[in-house]
Amino acid sequence: MAFLRLLARNRLALAGGIVMAAVVLLALVTPLLPLADPDVTDTANRFKPTFSEGALLGTDHLGRDLLSRLLWGTRLSLAVGFAAAITAATIGAAIGIVAGYFGGRIDNVIMRGVDMLMAFPYILLALAIVAALGPGLMNALIAVAAVNVPFFARNIRGITVGIAHKEFVDAARLSGLSDLRIITTEILPNVVPVIVIAMSTTIGWMILETAGLSFLGLGSQPPQADLGSMLGEARSALITNPHTSVVPGVMILVIVMAINLLGDGVRDALDPRLKSGALSRPRAATTVKRDGPVPAATGAGLLEVQDLRTEFHVKGRSYRAVGGVTLNVKPGECLGIIGESGSGKSVTALSVMGLVASPPGVITGGAVRYDGEDLIGAPYARLREMRGRNVAYIFQDPLATLHPLTRVGDQLIEAIRVHRPIGAKEGRAKAIDLLDAVRIPNAARRIDDYPHEMSGGMRQRVGIAMALANDPDIIIADEPTTALDVTVQAQILALLDDLRRSRGLAIVFITHDFGVVAQLCDRVAVMYAGRIVEEGPTAAILDTPTHPYTARLMACVPELGAGKRRLEAIPGLPPVVDRLPVGCAFADRCDRTQPDCRAGEIDLARHGARAVRCLHPVTPLREAAE
Ligand code: ADP
Ligand code: MG
């Protein structure tokens, strides 16, 4: 059902599907229609024009009714085309699965055979097969199916090789399943979508090929009509009576176009990567639909996030990932944002430069100010100018953000070139400088490495170097050390701290680890379910956490030499952001919950440098350290 809905969203595919359904329906009911016998000749009425009495589409060179021949011919052409496609797909897929699953010598022997078939131009091959078997519709079908088998075999083998070495297949093998069971229960369900896609995109081709053979007189034999033979017979009267060629020609065009449009739609809709999101590419900047007033600048920092709201609109639902976040960062300051996975940290960070994927992301309120300038309402050209130059990002997984086929030096130079023209020599020198700055030993040589030739820590250093490439004022680092081991993490943190001091960088550091915050950040904001629940100087919050959530988060951090202190996991899960509870979102997991916690909106109460969104804090804000 979801598949049909996705398919229907694609206008062209929908049109193709409707046309195809109509044609197939017509072909199915042809025997029931009050049509003239398609094979009865009536030479007295040769070449009657279209719309003449008793022959809606006219008659051909033997006086046969063209409408009747067209419908019967379409029926035959479709049947042969579909039969050829199914035959080719079944045989080809079977060959491909066997070759891909067993691999080794079996694979070699089978695929070399397939390669040999592919070495012939397929029309010639089809002609040769028909020549050997003799002309006739059945033989044309066999020929068309045979020349398409290699295409399916190659395609499916490739997919199967990829699947056959996945862990779930190994697990099935270890559990003692036979090869046949594994192929039918583990492999086949995973390749069926590919088979369907390959079929839907080649079926039109096969109808054309069959028509081609019939056109040459090698397929359907007179008096039987199919679209190809109708065209072939009309050829001699092409100039004098064009309608005899136009009628089957238009039908072939319509069928092949409709099938191809539908096939493309099926391919898009079956691709699991496209299923979850929209079928369209994300826009270059996040969609903005602010309904409230835009908050005025307060000059509280270099970067001010004011009451930011970002939602995801998926299938009629709104997921409120960020629900009114206010933050500010001063030049040279390091602000930590901490919270469990899913609390909206990344979405907050990406919203700053309009990098949240749209659709489905929409910024529905608030402002982000860089030096007073509102970025949420800024035109795309301005955002592009500022991305990387004023605010740069470092992401969690450098292997995923670096281009695997480009040398790291070239990627660094490209990052610079986006913002200013730079010559090859100067670019190289600058790239070496950058790698030096992030303390990659032997930078001059490393610059020619590919990302896979570096270790995880080194790749993250390259990620930092890219962020530094255009001397930004602010770096937003989204869990940059989560994928690294602790010793490398410590080095990266030290590096960031040095860069901050030497270059006067402001850093927004996103993490779920209080240990990291303690090492690096001046101030910290704790996020839960898309909102800031506590904020203040790092030392003060570490000393006396006031929000129960902060206290619980800190209890999750192991402490060296702390003896037998128990690590407390927080029970329950963060709330789903499309159905946030009224009042405190943490109430369900909190052990201090009172009835008033669920009564209504809870404000962020401020006292000095600290703020907390809680009615019953662990320590009252007045008494907490500042
Ligand atoms: P984290 O704090 O771990 O970085 P995120 O900011 O990535 O969390 O996510 C916040 C919320 O937004 C989560 O509930 C997540 O499911 C939701 N979300 C993130 N990206 C999308 C998306 N593309 N479509 C729908 N929901 C999303
Ligand atoms: Mg994240």
Image (cartoon, rainbow, N blue to C red):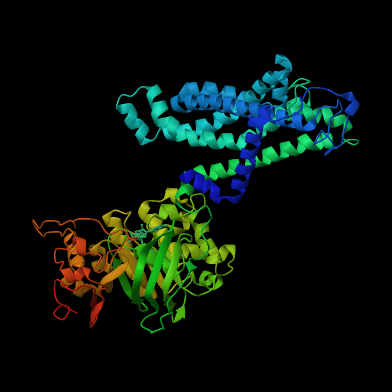
Left or right, 501 with respect to 420, comes to left
Can you give x and y, in whole percent of width and height, for residue 339 in the image?
28, 63
Residue located farthest toward the left when viewing the structure as drawn: 564
Picture quadrant of residue 512: bottom left
Q: Nearer the viewer, residue 289 or 69?
A: 69
- Viewer-closest of 414 and 225: 225
Does the image show residue 349? no
Does the rendering let one see residue 52?
yes
Asked which quadrant contains residue 343, the reply is bottom left
Find residue 59 and report its horizontal and vertical position in percent.
84, 31
Count every numbered label the image shows and give the total. Answer: 0
Picture quarter with ligand 2: bottom left
Most extreme residue toward the top, as rendered?
Answer: 133
From the viewer's side, name the closer residue of 360 and 150: 360
At horizontal 39% and vertical 84% (from top left) the residue drawn is 299
Name the side, left or right, on which 358 lies relative to 25: left
Q: Nearer the viewer, residue 40 or 531?
A: 40
Residue 285 location (% of width, % of height): 50, 66
34 to 584, vertically: above or below: above
Q: Is residue 501 left or right of residue 592?
A: right
Which quadrant of the figure contains the C terminus?
bottom left
Residue 475 percent coordinates (x, y) = 40, 69
